[in-house]
Amino acid sequence: MGWAQAANKEPLKFGLAMPLTGSQALFGADQAKAAQWAVQDINAKGGVDGHPLEMILLDTQADPRLGINAVNRLVNVDKVPVFGTAWSAVVKAVAPIANRSQVLGLSVGANSPEIAKLGDYVYTTYPLADVDVVAQARYARETLKKERAAVLYIHNDSGVEGAKIYRDAFESLGGKVVAYEAYDAQSTDYTGALLKVRTSNPDIIHIQGLVSDLPQVIAQIRQLGIKQPISTYSAGYNPKVIQQLGAAAEGLMVSALAPSAEQNPRIAEFVERWKKTEGRIPNGLPYTQYLYDMPYLIADLYGHLLKNGKPLTGANMREALVEVANFDLPMTGKLQVSADHRVKKPVYLFEVKNGAFAPVATVE
C-alpha cells in the first residue's frame, strides 16, 4: 500500500558514490546495501509525502579521480540536489564540484578533520577523527595510565591527520610519543617501521590505518614479538579483523561512533536482517549504520522543502540542513549539524576479549 502511494508522484532523487569494486569494495558495497535498504524501507511506508525516494548509485573504487567522474555525472547528468560519498581522499576531491554547482555534498563515513573546512556545500554526518581518536588518547592516558605511546599511521590523508590528532592529544595529557612512524599505503611489509616501534619500547601502540591494511600490520607486530597493547580507531571495529587475526586480535582496543546491538535494539534487528539476507554480519557495522541513516536524513530535507513550498535545489537542500539542524535517525540516533560543519556523537570503546568485541567504556 505504502509503495503504491509513493509511486504516484515524481521520484525524489539523490546520489551515492561509493567503492563498489576495488580494494575497499568489501566495505563500500555493504555500506551501499545499507543505504539501499533504507530507501526500500522509506518507500514501503509511503516515501516522502507520497514521493518515492530514488537513489542513484555509482562506483568510486575509493579513487579520487573516479570519485570526480561519478559526482560530475550525478550533478550534471542526473541533476541531483544532494549526494553522499565517503573515504576522505574522495570527499576532498569532489568538494569543489559540490561548491561550484551548489549541490549539497554529505560525507558519510570519512573522518579527515579537513572535511569540516571544504566549503559551504560540504557537510559531514559522521564525526571526524578529532572525536574518537582524542577519546582513544584520553582513555590510554587517564584510564589505562599509559606514559609512552608509539603511533603508526598509513601515509594518506586519513592516516596523517588522525596520527597527528592522537599524538597531540596524548602529549597534551602529559604522555610522551616515543615513536611516530608512517607506512606506505601500497606496502605489505612493515618491518622497518615496526622495528623502530619495538626499539622505542612504548607502553601502548596506536595505529591509524585502513580496514584493508590493519590486520596485516597487527599480525606483523605480533610476529616480531611486540607484545604491548594496541589501539586503533573505528576502522578496527570489524569482525573481519578478528577473523583474520585470530588469537593475535586479543586485547585490541577499538572505537566505534555508533551503538552496538547490545546498546540499541534497532541495531540488533539490523544485524539480524544482515544474517537473514546475507548470512553474515556487515563489514564495518558502524559505517553501515550511518549509511542506512543517510536516506532518512535526505528524506527529512526533502520533506522540509515540500512542506515549505520551496524548490528542490541544492541551495535549498543546504539551507534545509542548516535550518532543521537536529535529526533523529533510526540507527545512530540524534544528529546535530553545527555551523562549523561538524557533528558530535558519543564514542564507544571496545576491547577484543575471547574473540569478540566487548564494551569497555563510553565517552560522551
Image (tube, rainbow, N blue to C red):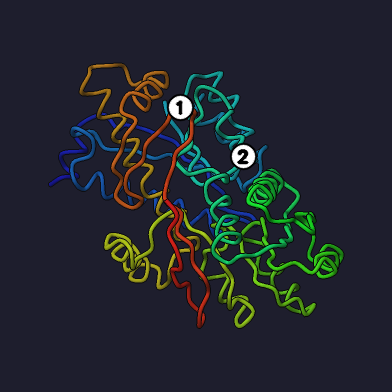
* Mark 2 element type: helix
Q: Earlier in the sequence, mark 1 or mark 2?
A: 2
Structural crowding at the residue carrying mark 1, measured as other residues with C-alpha within 10 Å and reported as few (<14), some (14–19) or many (≥20): many
Image position of 349 with respect to 317: above or below:
below
- What residue appears at the point 59 percent right and 54 percent down from the top-left corner? 21
Mark 2 = which residue? 90
- Residue 46, above or below 29: above
Residue at 69% over, 56% down? 175
- Which residue is label 1 attached to? 104
- The answer to whether residue 183 of the structure is visible from this angle is no
Who's the residue at 45% across and 59% down the image? 348
Residue 128 in percent (x, y) is at 54, 43
Cα separation between marks 1 and 2: 15 Å
Report the amino acid beneath label 1. Leu
Compared across the picture, whether 238 is left or right of 43 comes to right
Q: Is residue 208 left or right of residue 45?
A: right
Amino acid residing under circle 2:
Val
Q: Dot 1: what SS? A: strand
Task: Mark 1 and mark 2 in contact? Answer it, CB < 8 Å.
Answer: no
